Structure formats: structure tokens, C-alpha cells
Amino acid sequence: MSERKIRVLIAKPGLDGHDRGAKVIARALRDSGMEVIYTGLRQTPEQIVAAAVQEDVDAIGLSILSGAHNVLFPEIMRLLKEEGADDIAVFAGGIIPEKDIPKLKALGIREIFLPGTSTSRAVEAIRAAVSK
Amino acid sequence: MPYTTQVADKPFYDDRDLALRGFDATKDLGTPGNFPFTRGPRATMYRGKLWTMRQYAGFSTAAESNRRYRYLLERGTTGLSIAFDLPTQIGMDSDDPRARGEVGKVGVAIDSIADMEMLFDQIPLDHVSISMTINSPASILLALLLVVAERRSVGWSNLNGTIQNDILKEYVARGTYIFPPAPSLRIVTDIFEFCAKEVPRWNTISISGYHIREAGATAVQEVAFTLANGLQYIKAAIDRGLGIDTFAPRVSFFFNAHNDFLEEVAKFRAARKLWATLMRERYDPKDPRSLALRFHAQTAGSTLTAQQPENNVVRVAYQAMAAVLGGCQSLHTNSRDEALALPTEESATIALRTQQILANETGVPATVDPLAGSYAIESMTLDIEREARALIEKIDSMGGALPAIESGFVQRAIGDSAYAAQQAVEKKTSIVVGVNEFTDERPSPLPILTIDESVERDQVARLAEFRKQRRGDVRGALDTLDRAARDGKNLMPPIIDCVRNDCTVGEIVSTLKQTFGEYTDQGF
């Protein structure tokens, strides 16, 4: 019996168009054997949570570089809880100031990957969180 | 090397390399200011006029950005470059629910003529050149500027500046599109046509390789995709019936100044030569300015590291020197803290000082195209030209840049290069100081800029007040615009009229969406 592949949603919340990181990480996760759904740009928190539930993902990776994380991430986490989907492991990456990280982790975001993070580290973190 | 096409893969170059490539100094170089412009668009280059030090800036409200512009002008910056927030860039008013969290974040929020008047308060519009990084709603932001000028009795023919207005690269790299590609291209052409008559000194487009490179493209891809986009705009204007020399002299470019120093110098020279050659082959313009590629350069944001951010000052300085040796007409130098947040005033000042040192202390600007004749530089220039030309011909065979973008060809090529660059960093075939080598666990010492969430509330309140107080014929102006969109008329006059009648950016865009529809990310 083949083991179910880890399923990950890579999402771009907000309006920013910087998708190099999101696309690179999506490809690295795929290369490591995961199934990856990429939302494309300009997703609202509602759209992201709906896609995560519908695709039955194990993890979500949020990529944002515009500075809107303090508004959009809490909304995504609230909606996941509301949908009873808060078992999904949420990760984030982008231009996120250090001082915002404790607040975001307190919302339940597992890890925040800053510029310079290797894709292998992100793969390991997702694998570890999902296999628990 | 992480970011390069590896054109420089030889231990040394000599005359055999030039002979192998058929190098002919008369044909391949000419003299500065003359075809094929390899050595520069002007004969005297920086001896005649230094490059414009144009620092991209803007954040929070119009009043706050206005203060930063006046601060920069007082410190010797010579041209303004306006950064708009994302809602403005995609034509949403600040009170749009989808704008939540984004208002005033990556640039200034502009909703109406009231914001634009405040943005340029006390700034002499006829003396400072103004560059606006705006694409999909470029027509609207230009209209706003024209109406501010009109109200201050500054003639449109005295305005000097640039709108980015390069919509094609938004679909492959930058992401601030609104309408589908075809109607977007129509608006770009409307602007060409209008400005040729009414705003003759305005640079109507800045065809941008910068973001294509930031998205992961190699140097060759940057040149090829940018020039292919350029050829698409030229074709659209010719198809409209515009004479080549009525608009081509106002076309400008925007390139990335990346890490690989020699390759970058060669890239700028190759881009100039290839553009002049392609334009002559295809359109044979009579005005030499239609052939001469002028460009703005910005140092590469994607090379900045969050780790040991002070090192970024050094990266920026080398990249800036490559841009100057490559003959840029204007330059933005990034700030050391941009992998962490928007730059602080102190970081932005160091970035400007970097250019001033380059201009005044290094002696580099005194000699036009000083690296010409170098075996390595000339070999690389010819290699980049040849490879970029082959890629452009491949795009031609697909029907041009528009179909190549619509099919996802360009996006996939960029994605492949970005992934290869990341793998090279992880395998350490490419070294990034402070990231995968020479690391240091001490935390970053830099203070960073944060935009208070109250900016959004204030801007939304300001917009509500504007809507309440306005006296213009909003409905009438929007209806006229709607008819012009449907009838295929030039949209600039009705958009200017909308602005005069106090319509907001979001209202104008919503009206145009009724005819043009909306583009959504295809996820290539």
C-alpha cells in the first residue's frame, strides 16, 4: 500500500506580486515528493482557507513580501479555526520583521522563514510537522 | 555563479576570442552617441550630463511621502521616483475591502486629485523630473499629474519624467496587472499617441527588465524578454498608424544592475547595440533618437541579504559601478535594509551617498565607456547580443511577446532559471556571503522602518471626506469614459476629465473593467 503523499498549499495572500519565492518553494516541495497546489497571486484569506479545506492539505505555506502580514495572517488563522481546519500546519515566509515573529507564532504559525532560508530546511520543517 | 548565464567561463580572453566572434570595432562599437550605440546613447556621456540620481521612494500617506521627497531633494537627489502602494498600483481605492493591510505599505496611497496635490506640494514640477512606477493605471496617475500641473499653471510641455507603463512584464514578473493583455496594450498605445502631441518631453514607457531579472531570469533572458516586450509595444503603435519617429524617441528602458560585474557591464552595452540593430532592421527610423536605447538602472534587490545587512552597502556599490560603466542615464541604489523592511531614512541616505561617491570621487564618469576594447568585455558583449537575439527570434516565431506571455513560455523560462539559481546556492556552487558561507549568528543590528496601521485608517477617512466634499460631475465623467472605452477612442482625454471631476482611481478602473474585464493569475 502506498503511503499518502504530504499535501501542501502554497498561497500568496494580499496584493503583492513577488512570487519568485513561492514558486521556488513549490517546486522544491514537489521535487521532495510532496503534492503541491499553488494558488497564484492576490488571494484573500477566505480563498486561501477554502482552497486548503477543499484540497484537504496537511500544510499551508504563506508567502508575503508587502508588509500586510500582521493584518492578513491573523485573519487566515481565525478562519482556519472557524472551519475546524486548525490541524493544518501553517508556515510563512517573506519579508517579515523579526519583531513581528513572536506575535505571529502565538497565532499558531509553526515557523517563519526569512530571506536566505534553504528550501531543504523548509522541506524538513514541513515533513516534521506533518508526521507528528 | 548564481545569477549568471556563465558567459564568462574562460580563464582569460585575448585577440583570438575577438577574431572568433568576428569583432569589428567600426561596426560593433562605432563612436559614443552614434549607431549602434554600444558605447552610449550620447557622445559626451557623463562629461556632458551626469546620470540622474533617482531614488525610488514613497510610503504611507501623500503628506509623509512629500516630506521624504523634499528631504531627498535637499540632500542632492536630482529626480524623484514615486513608489505607490499596492492598492494604487492595481487600481483599488484605499477603502476597498481587498486593500486591507496594504494601504501605504510599499508606497504611497493615491486615491484622488487631493492626494496627488499633496504629494507634489512645494515641488517645482517644471524643474524636477518625476518618475512614477505605475503600470496598469499609468494613464490615471499621469492624468492626475497633468491636472496638478494645470492647476499650478505649469504647461504640460514643460513636464519631464517617466511613467513605467510597461504592462507586459507585469504578467511575467511583477504581478500588478488589472486588465487582460490585449486591452492593456491598447491603453499603452493611447498614452504614446496622446503624449506625442500633448506632453512631448515625457518618457511614455520604461520597458523593464529589472523585475524580470528579480524574478530569476539570467542576464541574457533579461535582455531578450525586455527587448521582445519593447518590440511588441512598437508594433502596437505602428499598427495604430503612429509614425515611428513620433513616439520611439520617448521610449526608455529599465535594467537590473546585478552581481556579476563584467557580465553586467557587457549586458548594458549589448542591450543598446541589439535594440538599435533590431529597430533599424525592422522600422528604419530617420531620427537617431528612435534607435538609441536610454535606460534607468537599479541595483538588484534580490541579491540583498537579511543576514549581516551592512554587507549590502558593498554589494550595492559594486552593482552601481557596473551600471555606470555600462552607461545608465539614471540610477537607483538600494538600501542596506531592504531584505528586512522598507528603508529607513538613514539607510536611504547611505544609498544616495554611494552614488555621490561614485560620481565625485572615483573618476569613473570622466571617461566615456572606459572598458571598450577589453577582450573580455567585448567578447561577452557579443555573446550576450547573439544569445539574446536567438531568444528574441524564438519569441518572434511564436508571434511575438504577447503570445509568448499568454502561452506561459516566458514565465516558465524565468521559473526554471530562478530554481537553478536557488539550487546553486544550496549546493554551494554559488556563494552568498553571510548566507551559505561566512555566516555569523549575531542578530542584525539595524533599526527598521515600520508603517503604523493607523496610516490605513487615516487614508480611508481622508478618502471618505473627499467623497463627501467633492463637487465634480463624477457620474457624467465616468459615463463618457465608459463610452470611449467601448468605442475604441483614445482614453487619455476622458481619463483626464474624470480626474478633473474628482473621480477616484478605483472608480475609473472599475468603469474600465466593465469593458475590458479582469486578468487572473494563470499560475504558470
Image: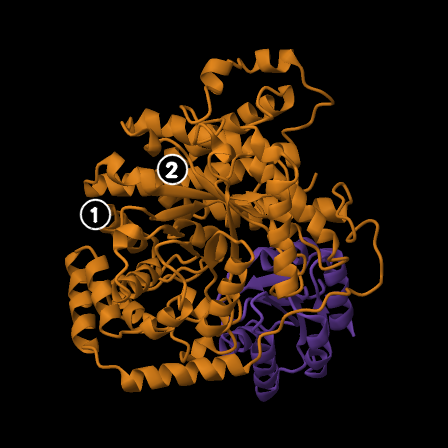
Chain colours: A purple, B orange
* Residue name at image x 62 percent, y 21 percent: B374
| Image quarter hosting the N terminus of chain A | bottom right
Nearer to us of marks 1 and 2 is 1
Check contact, mark 1 vs mark 2: CB within 8 A: no
Q: Secondary structure at mark 1?
A: helix
Q: How far across and how far down the image is residue A75, in percent?
A: 57, 82
Q: How far across and how far down the image is residue B147, in percent?
A: 27, 64
Q: Which mark is residue B283?
A: none
Host chain of mark 2: B
Residue B66 visible in the current orientation: yes
**Hey, what amino acid is under mark 2?**
Met
* Residue name at image x 35 percent, y 50 percent: B160
**Hey, what amino acid is under mark 1?**
Lys
Q: Can you tell which quarter of the image residue B207 is in? A: top left
Q: Which residue is mark 2?
A: B398
Q: Is residue B337 left or right of residue B32?
A: right
Residue A40 visible in the current orientation: no
Q: How far across and how far down the image is residue B58, in percent?
A: 50, 65
Host chain of mark 1: B
| Image quarter hosting the C terminus of chain A | bottom right
Q: Which residue is mark 1?
A: B197
Q: In the picture shown, does residue B168 fall above or below B231?
A: below
The answer to whether marks 1 and 2 sit on the same chain is yes
Q: Residue B181 or A97: which is nearer the viewer? A: A97
Q: Can you tell which quarter of the image residue B286 is in? A: top left
